[in-house]
Amino acid sequence: MYFIANWKMFGNLKSINSIKNVINLSTKLKYRKAKIIYCPPYTLLDQFVKKTIKTKIDIGAQDCHTHQNYGAFTGSINAKMIKNAGSKFIIIGHSENRNTGDTNKIINLKIKSSLNEKLKIIFCIGETLKEKKNKKTNQVINTQIKKGLKDIKKINNIIFAYEPVWSIGTDIIPELDDLRNQVKKIKFFIKKTYKVKNPLVLYGGSVNPKNILSLREISLINGFLIGAASQNSKKFIDIIKKTIN
Ligand code: 13P
């Protein structure tokens, strides 16, 4: 079961101390099934890596530049640098970045350069409210997957994160039956297209200590990508405990 903390553009040197209790939890036998990954902003990657080096917790970045090698791209960070900073994972295709210009083609390049660095990808997919209302959800998601993974044959280093855009930061989660069906469809599409047996699909969007009790009932879901609630260790721990218990 994956519990991935996406800190987005939050956090400073002080906030790293707040993960102490999460580290403690990760050492307990009962929670060994919980795969905890922190994705802090670039500025804190190194500190997070140092803080978690002797633990089972892994670190990931939230995005990267498309360019594989070093280059004159002011303000950018590539997958090579992220790997070098000690990250094992990377989030790619988050809707907040799709919103500011990441096309499926750009996402494809970012995934390829990250795979070349042997990073594990947390590949975000999901429809907007308008697309949902127009009954375009499946079409949108399948296109995001197909174009995002164009020319990529082996997808064993890719974890899918279904994040309906209208669920992110809104405190609204999908109807449970709808979510179960959607995850089922996504898994079916991945299995059929990439000939894999057990693709991992996480859910993300307003996951919190209250709604986790319903979300955990959907056994097809392999974990959660958590934004706001993951910045608060108490809430993050609560989510992990309620899922595993
Ligand atoms: P929230 O949990 O804050 O809705 O964010 C979800 C998300 O975007 C995780 O990537």
Image (cartoon, helix red, strand yellow):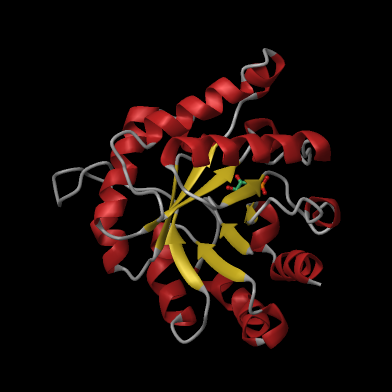
Residue 77 in view here: no
Q: Position of residue 222 (x, y in %)?
A: 64, 56
Q: Is residue 152 above or below residue 26?
A: above
Q: Nearer the viewer, residue 98 or 196?
A: 196
Q: Is residue 23 left or right of residue 89?
A: right
Instruction: Locate the N terminus by quadrant.
Output: bottom right
> Relative to residue 36, is residue 115 depicted above or below?
above
Residue 27, given in percent of the width and then of the height, sits at 62, 86
- Residue at position x 48%, y 81% from top? 51
User: Which residue is drawn at the image coordinates 26% and 60% (left, top)?
Assistant: 81
Q: Is residue 138 left or right of residue 31?
A: left
Image coordinates for residue 104, horizontal then vertical, percent: 39, 29
Q: Is residue 112 above or below residue 137?
A: below
Report x, y in % for residue 140.
Answer: 54, 23
Q: What residue appears at the point 62 percent right and 17 percent down from the top-left corner?
A: 136
Q: Is residue 185 left or right of residue 45?
A: right
Q: Residue at x 61, y 75 (%)?
A: 19
234, 144: nearer the viewer: 144
Give the quarter of the image for residue 244: bottom right
The quadrant of the rendering that contains the C terminus is bottom right
As rendered, which of 161 and 196 lies closer to the eye?
Answer: 196
Residue 47 visible in this rendered orientation of the protein: yes
Give whichever of 245, 7 is nearer the camera.
Answer: 245
Count of picture labels: 0
Q: Quadrant of residue 49?
A: bottom left
Q: Work out which residue is located at the far top of the displayed protein and give it.
A: 134
Q: In the image, is residue 236 above or below residue 124?
A: below
